[in-house]
């Protein structure tokens, strides 16, 4: 009997090549999936990412080998053309209401301040031995914006894509846990009780004009941010103009869902054990947390500083909503405000810096690209 | 070897650029809202916004 063929078949099986690293990554992928399902931690991304981590660590499946299934999506949609994150932004723009920003434009400053954490972590990453491009990719986690993190990292430091994307989405899911202690530490009870007046009504013309204005201003200043900001704003225009309801519905539903599926799977597929299981990955998670904390703190501090000059005080808790985790960060600001005063409604005011933070993070990513992309 | 001068330049241009662009956007929104408010003033002179 010829045992050669039998041996060949056995060696072609994944079982023959499983390593401890593979098993660990399966466990990690399953943990992400369980957290997404049981605790509702960013399930739309963490379920496909977790599954991608699992399947890419099956030996001999080679889904990320050139020409194979996941490689095709990853190579063309992310690595070569980087089109998935802007398409996600198209959907997010169609779901975003910029009314709070238009009604109170100074909240844009809080969105800008929240990007300070990005740069604190940028320097911290350099000290830990990362290159400029890697440091920028890690720092942008502080913006708490998954698509922007993916957009930037895939161009500047694709070898870190898996770790930075998982870190960004994990910390976005952990906003209700990470932010409140920082908010209580940096504000007084009196400040948290500040009531803000109701936002003025924003006209339809303003809501239609805003995406056009924002596109022109941001993209003329930072052309590298055009893919993200442009798609964000065209999605918003679809929503606000009222005459392309089916485009708006498609952007908010079918398009973003399809893109999310492939984005999540591709991100998960960038995490084979030999790439993910390095000390660098732990540093990235640690630095990502630092970025997030500093972004929260810098928004709070600027809000407190603004109150020194403003006649009508703002509740500094809305400064913490300057991170781009929309709408979770706004809800957290509201929750912390309710702790002090059950009749203090600041959710809509917090949405201003919250959506401004998305623009700020996209702008920060655009500037990193124009300075560091060779 | 950390390229500190480049890193500091990236920080200054990066953070400064984000702040500047959002300040300009803020100014743009304020001006735009005033213009819209002016045109949306109805016949009685009341501002509809």
Image (cartoon, coloured by chain):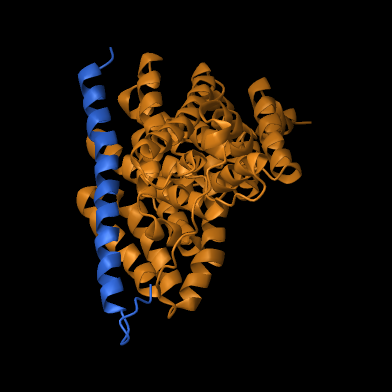
What percent of the width, then of the height, locates residue B41? 31, 79
**The furthest residue to the right:** A1
* Chain A as rendered: colour: orange
Q: As drawn, which residue projects farthest toward the bottom?
A: B43
**In screen coordinates, is A340 left or right of A240?**
right
Picture coordinates of residue A90, whole percent (x, y): 43, 60
Foreground residue, A6 or A320? Answer: A320
Residue that extends furthest to the front in the rendered view of this protein: A311
**Which percent across, then down, holds residue A267?**
52, 41
Name the one closer to the observer, A199 or A240: A199
- A3 lies above or below A249: above
Picture colour for chain B:
blue
Question: Is residue A269 in view from this perspective?
Answer: no
Q: Residue at x 31, y 25 (%)?
A: A132
Location of the C terminus of chain A by quadrant is top left
Give the camera-side residue of A170 and A302: A302
Q: Position of residue A237 (x, y in %)?
A: 39, 68
Name which residue lies at 54% across and 21% down: A282
Residue sitting at x 40%, y 72%: A203
- Judge left or right: residue B43 versus residue A44: left
């Amino acid at each position: 009997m010829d045992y050669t063929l039998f041996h060949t078949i056995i060696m072609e099986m994944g079982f023959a090549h499983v390593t401890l690293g593979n098993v660990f990554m399966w466990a990690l992928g399953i943990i992400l999936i369980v957290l997404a399902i049981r605790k509702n931690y960013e399930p739309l991304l963490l379920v496909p990412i977790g599954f991608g981590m699992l399947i890419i660590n099956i030996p001999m499946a080679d889904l990320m080998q050139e020409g194979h299934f996941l490689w095709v999506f990853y190579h063309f949609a992310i690595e070569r053309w980087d089109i998935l994150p802007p398409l996600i932004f198209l959907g997010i723009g169609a779901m975003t209401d910029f009314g709070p920003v238009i009604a109170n434009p100074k909240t844009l400053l809080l969105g800008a301040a929240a990007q300070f954490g990005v740069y604190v972590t940028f320097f911290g990453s350099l000290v830990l031995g990362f290159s400029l491009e890697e440091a920028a990719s890690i720092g942008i986690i502080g913006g708490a914006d998954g698509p922007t993190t993916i957009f930037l990292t895939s161009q500047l430091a694709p070898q870190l894509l898996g770790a930075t994307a998982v870190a960004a989405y994990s910390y976005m899911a952990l906003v209700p846990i990470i932010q409140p202690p920082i908010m209580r530490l940096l504000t007084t009870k009196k400040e948290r009780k500040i009531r803000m007046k109701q936002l003025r009504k924003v006209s339809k013309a303003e809501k239609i004009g805003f995406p056009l204005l924002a596109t022109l201003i941001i993209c003329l200043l930072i052309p590298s941010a055009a893919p993200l900001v442009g798609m964000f704003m065209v999605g918003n225009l679809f929503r606000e103009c009222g005459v392309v309801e089916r485009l708006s519905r498609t952007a908010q539903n079918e398009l973003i869902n399809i893109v999310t599926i492939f984005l999540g799977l591709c991100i998960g597929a960038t995490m084979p054990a030999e790439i993910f299981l390095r000390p660098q990955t732990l540093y990235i998670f640690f630095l990502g947390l630092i970025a997030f904390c500093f972004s929260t703190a810098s928004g709070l501090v600027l809000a407190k500083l603004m109150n020194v000059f403003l006649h009508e005080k703002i509740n500094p808790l809305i400064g913490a909503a300057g991170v781009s985790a929309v709408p979770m960060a706004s809800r957290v600001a509201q929750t912390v405000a309710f702790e002090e005063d059950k009749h203090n409604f600041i959710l809509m005011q917090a949405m201003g810096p919250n959506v401004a933070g998305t623009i700020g993070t996209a702008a920060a990513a655009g500037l990193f690209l124009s300075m560091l992309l060779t | 070897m950390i390229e500190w001068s480049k890193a500091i330049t990236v920080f200054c241009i990066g953070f400064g650029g984000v702040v500047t662009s959002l300040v300009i956007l803020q100014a743009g929104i304020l001006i735009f809202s005033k213009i819209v408010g002016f045109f949306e003033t109805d016949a009685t002179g009341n501002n509809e916004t």
